[in-house]
Image: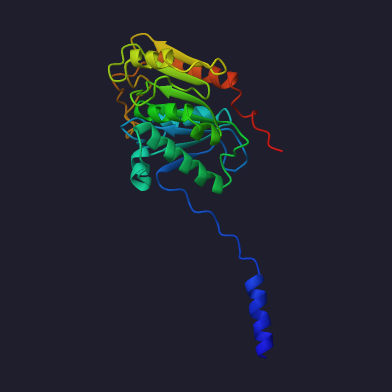
Amino acid sequence: MPRLALLLSALLAAAPLPAQPPAPLPADLHLLPAAPDPKPRPWAIFFPRAAGVGTLAPGNQYADLAAFLNERGIDVVVVDDDAALKRLDPSGSAGEKRAAIAVDALRRLREQDRFDTRCPGLVIGWSRGGEGALTLASSARGTDSGIRAAIVYYPSVGGQPSPWPQHMPVLALQGTADGIAPAKKLETLVANRAENHAYPFVVKLYSGAKHRFDVAHPVDDPASAKIEKDFDAKAHADALAAIDAFLSEQAIGGTSCAPD
């Protein structure tokens, strides 16, 4: 009998443990997929401006751009970076901290079989969040994570090195009347970047447009009838057209991911 008990114990010890389900995403990562299934698709990670994510519903600037990308077959995760910074407490500059958040977010998403590395990725940042997007566009943390292009709306560029080492194509959307993140600072970054003809840095300047030119409604009250004072409908529409063209040029869309 003791021998039988020992044999059963040995068999149980050798038996493979059942696979553990992946941990749920942290509350500061908001997944907005193009479809509910985890089929491999191109993907994008958003870093918002200082006002935060707000309420992700139609009328919210991040929800609306996510829907725009979803229509093109691109999955989106929107990062509440203030909450993520408290959770992770990364070190470094504003851009470096957000790069660390992105790496962590992509690891967690991939544990859930999302944001496949075989599909092209995109990082989009607004204002302060643009600092993170630019950091990812200029370091191995971005390319090693599968990010292939960056889009920045009126980005903060104060923490970027000079010369700036560009590692991927970049599209910048900027108003000429922006008094918070002036166009001149962005143009200086572009002029002083390390020479790399393999990757374009496209700057779209919108005459008279201010900071937050794409914000039609308060992010925390997207259904409001209130129109934000800096919203510029023409600049916003032109920026969306520029994004559409950029995605086509960089082959990031529903047909650009065909894993084996």
Q: Residue furthest right?
A: 260
- Tell me if 179 is positioned left or right of 111 in this view: left
Q: Nearer the viewer, residue 21 or 166?
A: 166
Q: Is residue 50 above or below residue 155?
A: below
Instruction: Residue at 35% x, 25% y: name it.
Output: 127
Instruction: Residue at 54% x, 31% y: name it.
Output: 143
Q: Nearer the viewer, residue 42 or 136?
A: 136
Residue 20 showing in the rendered view? yes
Q: Quadrant of the C terminus?
A: top right
Q: Position of residue 35 (x, y in %)?
A: 57, 38
Instruction: Residue at 65% x, 83% y: name it.
Output: 6
Q: Residue furthest bottom?
A: 1
Which quadrant holds residue 235?
top left
Q: Position of residue 205 (x, y in %)?
A: 41, 11
Q: Position of residue 50 (x, y in %)?
A: 31, 31
Q: Nearer the viewer, residue 15 or 205?
A: 15
Q: Is residue 13 above or below residue 220?
A: below
Question: Total marks drawn?
Answer: 0
Q: Position of residue 212 (x, y in %)?
A: 34, 22
